[in-house]
Image (tube, grey):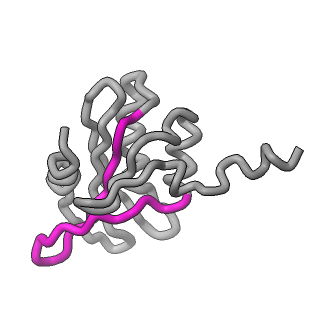
């Protein structure tokens, strides 16, 4: 699956819904598992509770018994349906790492032409190990 196809998959689930206390579905995520399955998720934020789209997509992946992924992307759409690729937050980066250490070599799509490894987004991922 190409990066553009994965971006389109993530964009296809963005269906923003505003509620009295929150905003749901304004960010979509698509993850390509190590077994070439695609899982999607949306964000949900209400009050002080927030779950990122990446967490929903990865949770769906893990529910099938998969814990390693090849690549992942999150997108946001504006009111005119323009698609913007957005980087994962720090919490999601750590979550990706913790579900399987091998995910450090997985690709994070930052733009249609920009891809980095999770390890590059967590430059001090092994700092504490070097302190011993």
Q: Is residue 85 left or right of 106 when viewed as pictured?
A: left
Q: Residue furthest bottom?
A: 79
Q: Quadrant of the C terminus?
A: top right
- Which residue is rendered at x = 23% and y = 60% of the image? 112
Q: Is residue 122 left or right of 92 when viewed as pictured?
A: right
Q: Quadrant of residue 123?
A: bottom right
Residue 73 rendering spot, x and y as whole percentages: 31, 52
Q: Nearer the viewer, residue 100 or 111?
A: 111
Q: Nearer the viewer, residue 17 or 55?
A: 55
Q: Is residue 130 found inside the magenta-colored segment of the image?
A: no
Camera sees residue 111:
yes
Q: Which residues are magenta?
A: 69-90
Residue 102 rendering spot, x and y as whole percentages: 52, 33
- Which residue is rendered at x = 80% and y = 46% of the image? 130
Q: Quadrant of residue 83?
A: bottom left
Camera sees residue 13:
no
Q: Quadrant of residue 74?
A: bottom left
Q: Is residue 123 left or right of 6 when viewed as pictured?
A: right
Q: Residue furthest right?
A: 132
Q: Residue furthest left?
A: 80
Q: How many marks?
A: 0
Residue 11 rendering spot, x and y as whole percentages: 18, 57
Q: Is residue 103 left or right of 81 when viewed as pictured?
A: right
- Which residue is rendered at x = 25% and y = 60% of the image? 113
- Which residue is rendered at x = 34% and y = 65% of the image? 86
Q: Quadrant of the N terminus?
A: top left
Above or below, 28 against 71 in this view is below
Q: Is residue 78 found inside the magenta-colored segment of the image?
A: yes
């Amino acid at each position: 699956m190409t990066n553009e196809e994965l971006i389109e998959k993530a964009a296809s689930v963005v269906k923003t819904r505003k509620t009295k206390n929150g905003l749901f579905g304004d960010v979509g995520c698509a993850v390509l598992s190590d077994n070439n399955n695609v899982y999607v998720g949306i964000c949900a934020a209400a009050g002080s509770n927030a779950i990122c789209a990446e967490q929903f997509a990865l949770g769906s992946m893990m529910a099938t018994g998969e814990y390693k992924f090849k690549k992942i992307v999150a997108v946001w759409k504006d009111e005119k349906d323009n698609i913007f690729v957005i980087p994962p937050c720090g919490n999601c980066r750590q979550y990706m790492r913790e579900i399987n250490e091998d995910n450090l070599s997985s690709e994070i799509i930052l733009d249609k032409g920009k891809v980095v490894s999770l390890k590059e987004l967590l430059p001090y991922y092994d700092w504490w190990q070097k302190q011993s």
